[in-house]
Image (spheres, rainbow, N blue to C red):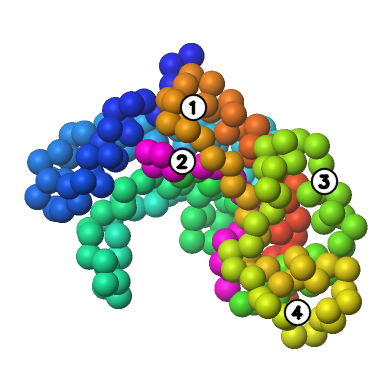
Amino acid sequence: MRPMITDTTLAFLRDLKGNNDRLWFGEHKPEYQLAYGEMLETVVQLLAGISGFDGDIATSHLDPKSCIMRINRDIRFSKEKSPYKTNFFAFINKGGRKSPRGGYYLHIEPGGSFAGGGIYMPEAAVLEQTRREINANFSEWLTILADKMFTLQFPEGVLPSGKLVRPPKGYESTNPAVEYLKFKGYYTQRFFADHEVTDPGFMAEVAKSFRAVNPLVKFLNRALFSMS
């Protein structure tokens, strides 16, 4: 099996990092298109794989292109004016990449590629409902995080995208779930070295990670479904 992501894509991203300007990008548009094509084919394969164990994705009929973030940076309110991101990022969930739902993601960047699932820095209403779901079903939450497949793929467990110092309003410090209730987001992360990204077995490894995080994604999305 040939690799989906090749050294060509990683080389383009490395070069872009050192030449992040519109003139250079325009002159190297063919290389970008080739790299984007590899990322697009990767997402096509991931959608097919996830559909095998996630019914929401199977019935959503997502456009693979809609799952890939634009490479252009929004620099309107940023002091850093580099016009392009130096990575490819795909986010897959039932509602599309702009949906508040939890989902699966793949980040391709030389020296910093990773895959995982969850919700990162959700809006306040989503975060509050997620906390309620964890509080009400804490035993189930712990069971998901203790699953052998989950811990094998994500030894660090679920990570916070920021964390409160004190319990959130409405929760006591003695609450058994308090440390998780302090989280401002819930996500997982498994890193891959460059040689793993370009290995023919990379897609199978990413699929393992996505399957392992599926129960967590379902739990997080159930919280959203119960929002009034």
Q: Reading the chain from its start, which is encountered first: label 4 or label 2?
A: 2
Tell me which segment is drawn in magenta: 109-123
Q: Are marks 4 and 2 in contact (CB under 8 Å)?
A: no
User: On the image, numbered disc 1 is attached to which residue?
Assistant: 196
Asked if residue 122 is among those painted magenta in the image, a careful observer would answer yes
User: On the image, numbered disc 4 is attached to which residue?
Assistant: 167
Report, in whole angstroms, how far the alpha carbon at label 4 lies from the one at label 3: 23 Å
Report, in whole angstroms, how far the alpha carbon at label 2 lies from the one at label 3: 25 Å
Asked if residue 170 is among those painted magenta in the image, a careful observer would answer no
User: On the image, numbered disc 3 is attached to which residue?
Assistant: 146
Is 192 above or below relative to 164? above
**Residue under the point 15% across and 38% down:** 28
Instruction: Point out the residue furthest to the front here.
Output: 165
**Residue under the point 39% across and 52% down:** 69
Q: Reading the chain from its start, which is encountered first: label 1 or label 3?
A: 3
Towards the viewer: 17 or 106: 17
Q: Position of residue 97 (x, y in %)?
A: 49, 55
